[in-house]
Image: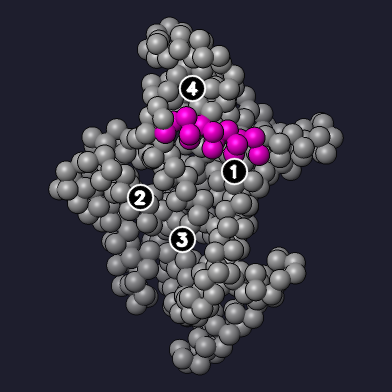
Amino acid sequence: MRRRDWIDLAAVAAIATLTNFIHFFLCDADFFFPDSFTYLAPAQNLLRGLGFFEGPGVVETMRTPGYPFLLALFGTHPLPVIVLQHLLNVAMVGGVYLITRRRVSRPAALVAAVLLAIDTPTIHVANKILSETLFTAVLFVVFLLALDARHLIATGALTGALVLIRPVAIAYFAVLAAYFIWRRLRPKQIAAFICVSLVLPLGWALRNAYHTGVFTVASISGTNLLGHRAAGVLAILDGGNFDDALARRRAELQARANAEVVEEEDVENAVDVDHAVMARYHARMAWPILLRHPIALAELTARGALINLFDSRWDALAMVSRLPQRWVRIAVVTLTVALFILFVFGMIILWQRDRALALLIGGTVGYFILIAAGGESEWRFRVPVMPEYAIAAGSGLSFVLFSPTRRKKYEGKA
């Protein structure tokens, strides 16, 4: 790299360090989210030598081991984990600058890196004991390896590891396989990638089947299918206030599932069975509802995708700002909407200039936004694709800000 690029890289890293650690110091050590303790419990059992279990004799199937292993590595002390997560954010900002500088232009790289450095949800979630930041970092590495398309075995291994950090990546290998087919890689290479990417998820599913009799990577998927997708579909059909209808339908479906478990498993209480067994009943009850109402499912998915894209988490910034909350909300919501417009515009620009980059960004963003689009949708589900999102948005904004003459000048030096 040239000296100018090193200066740029240092500048964007400094901005990311400031935004992340200002939030860190002003958050009053508020490191926990309701989900945090579902990661801490198995991590603490690992440290006690009990294995990856929810408690004595109770196998952990709701969470996969990736993030709890990281927590155990730090003795489940939150402070060093939070610091590491903020440093991962800084590293990803640097990575976004470097790949955008190489594939697009210097202005696009600077804009993309700054957009990621100031993204409120990305900064806020790094300040929590949650798996999103680790997942985002590993996903970004997978994205870079797939874009290069030369190290397919390593790409496959990390794609499988993604599933053990967050099961939402369960079918991402198919997106990458389709991309490799488009890149016209040899069928043997693609087959090897697919096989390697499935080793860890299949191995973990076999582990769960051995302990519970249920072949599943994470039993939370069945619970979410009933409580967020099937209940969400029924809430859409009910009309009125969605959140109220979702809570009511979720309670109804959960009561029915509990009664079925008690009857068929011959237990006094549904919680007496393994979570994986309970989740099997959840999935079995959910699928007929989803298949009977495809239009409502499509409406729920569209609603969830919009929330994933536009939920701004403005209140996270308001907590550490002295500005009036109304101003903060307007600023963050406006930036969120502007980012989406720039992302779309940037994708059009990239499709004309670097089709491989555009296709991989589109596939990655589309997959993770849609697979998490349901009754549970929120700002957190946009975080894993923010590096890719920022690359496209930065490319779009740089095209707007710089004149054709200046763009040509920068592109000639790229």
Nearest the camera: 195 or 266? 195
Residue that badge 4 annotates: 109
Point 66% across, 47% down: residue: 311
Reading the chain from its start, which is encountered first: label 1 or label 3?
3
What numbered label is drawn on residue 174?
none
Q: Main secondary structure of the magenta part?
A: helix
| Residue at left offset 59%, top offset 79% | 254
Image quarter in which the C terminus is found: top left
Residue 411 in the image, given as x and y percentages of width and height: 42, 14
Q: Position of residue 17 (x, y in %)?
A: 58, 25
Which residue is labeled 3 in the image? 63
Indicate the secondary structure of the residue bearing disc 1.
helix
Compared with 46, 151 (above or below) is above
Is residue 90 at least partly visible in the picture? no
Q: Which residues are magenta?
A: 337-351
The numbered mark, 4 or 3, whose residue comes first in the sequence reads 3
Q: Which mark is residue 175?
A: 2
Q: CA distance from mark 3 to mark 2?
A: 24 Å
Check residue 347 for magenta coloring.
yes
